[in-house]
Amino acid sequence: MSTLIEKTVIMDEQAIRRALIRIAHEIIENNKGIEDLVLVGIRTRGVPLAERLAAEIERIEGRCLTVGLLDITLYRDDLSTLSYQPVVHQTQIPVDINGKIVVLVDDVLYTGRTVRAALDAVIDLGRPKVIQLAVLVDRGHRELPIRADYVGKNVPTSSKEIVGVQLMPVDQADRVVIKGISE
């Protein structure tokens, strides 16, 4: 019988913090400030990442940034394989996104299917000027032509490995681990 075992910690709390500080600076620089900028966290772990990025950007720029929460459950292309009764959470974006710069925030970029679903969900809410993507970890193995604008860490992985992101307050720690199957 095979079990999933933790192989290595690739980012600890300090590495995550440093990556988010760097991404915050890159977002500000790339957009020439934060005018019309909205961060939207993809549930579940994209939300605390978006909140942390907003706090860092506020520390740098001295102004609050709008943060939204996006649930993509009904936009997934594998919805029928998940369960008969998927759990749908609320999407909360407190501003009109028409004409705004929307930065989608997620924990791991893998096949690109989550991001495709998030793009569909955002477009149903309005017509942003630009949609950008920030991820903590890009692990490769894309199935769709999607790339992140801002990446905390590129981690080449095997398709048999799992990248596990743990973030407070969702989890009991702040770290990124690679897990593998033990035979």
Image: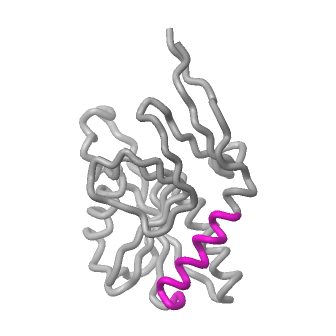
Q: Give the dominant element type of the magenta stretch: helix, strand or loop.
A: helix
Q: How is the image coloured?
A: one colour
Q: Is residue 29 magenta?
A: yes
Which span of residues is magenta-colored?
Answer: 18-34
On the picture, is 71 further left or further right than 50? left
Instruction: Give the tally of numbered discs.
Output: 0
Where is residue 168 shown, x and y percent of the image?
68, 51
Give 93 or 147, whichever is nearer the viewer: 147
Q: Residue at x 56, y 56 (%)?
A: 153
* Location of residue 115 by image quarter: bottom left
Judge whether 52 appears above or below 77 on screen: below
Residue 58 position by quadrant: bottom right
Q: Residue at x 72, y 45 (%)?
A: 173
> Residue placed at 66% from the left, 74% from the top?
55
Q: Residue 5: give x, y in percent of width and height.
A: 60, 24
Residue drawn at (43%, 69%) of the image = 149
Image position of 116 with respect to 76: above or below: below
Residue extending furthest toward the top: 1
Does residue 160 sit above or below 104 in this rendering?
A: above
Image coordinates of residue 174 in percent, x first then y, are: 69, 49
Which of the 4 quarters of the picture holds residue 91?
A: bottom left
Nearest to the observer: residue 21 or residue 119:
21
